[in-house]
Amino acid sequence: MSEIHDDDNDIPMLSGSALEALKEFYADRDAKEKELENLKAKKNTGDILSMDTFTENWNDSQFWYSQETADIFARELLAKCDNNSRIAVISAPSAFVQLKNIIASTSMPADKTPEIFLLEFDERFSIFPEFVFYDYKFPLKLPPSMKGTIDHIICDPPFLSEDCQTKAALTARWLSKPSGVSQSQSTSDPASRVIVCTGERMNTLVNKLYGPLGIHTTTFEPVHAKGLSNEFYCYANFECDNWKWKD
């Protein structure tokens, strides 16, 4: 008869503090899922939204902007807009959420409210009617009706790689209006206002990729809610009160 060993002592046991941390993690996850379900049920009620509802997924390189940075980007996207304007937010959902908050909190009249598109890979954001599924690996796999029609664009490529940056730039250029087709009455305004937010080490590549759109490195330094070790720059083809061109 073979000897029976009691292996119970070999099973690792979590400490009390570790168990509490695990319980807190699952409780927080469940609460976020419930918030998403409630938000999905409400749809467009005009409620103020919070990015806290959407937990960052670092595997997908998700890092939300600070409230101040998101607000600056959103206000620049809304500047000079009316109901004939179209705004595209590429892989920058925290800027998109702030856009919706500004529109809701200011009771923006219909004749001033632009059409907004959120181009995003994370399908949690599909609860919003503005959501358009976007995978940077297929930069032109978008509704044909969007080509060359967007007045204001913000693009925050998810990865600091040449491949990702190049394909995201292709998307932004495809969406942009042809040179000379500007909604603004000012001849100094570009056909499409474009903002790019990405790492400092992408500086040379970004200026090359977006050169045809008149992009320059600006003085504004975006801040992320939870901080990042990589220094980020803001690039744009226009100057404003929030930034000037460095070069």
Image (spheres, helix red, strand yellow):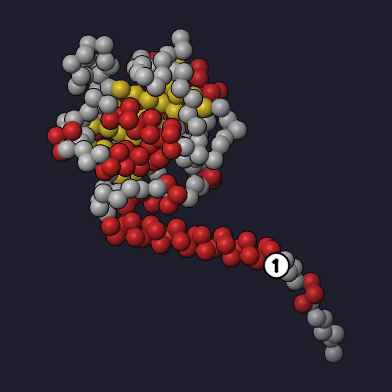
Quarter of the rendering containing residue 213: top left
- Examine the image and state in which quarter residue 40 appears: bottom left
* Position in image of residue 107 (x %, y %): 22, 41
Q: Is residue 230 above or below residue 43?
A: above
144 to 80, vertically: above or below: below
Residue at point 14% right, 34% down?
111
Relative to 75, does residue 188 appear above or below in the rendering? above
Residue 166 appears anywhere in the view: no
| Vertical relation: 68 (above or below) 220 | below
The front one of 172 and 75 is: 75
Mark 1 neighbour density, 10 Å: few (under 14) some (14–19) many (20 or more) = few
* Residue that carries the numbered disc 1 in the rendered image: 16
In the image: residue 167, left or right of residue 104? right
Residue at 26 percent across and 43 percent down: it is 104
> Which residue is situated farthest in the bottom direction here?
1
* Secondary element at tag 1: helix
Residue at the image point whose x is 38% and y is 30% from the top = 72
Seen at 27% across and 26% down, the residue is: 79
- Residue 89 visible in image: yes
Q: Position of residue 117 (x, y in %)?
A: 28, 38
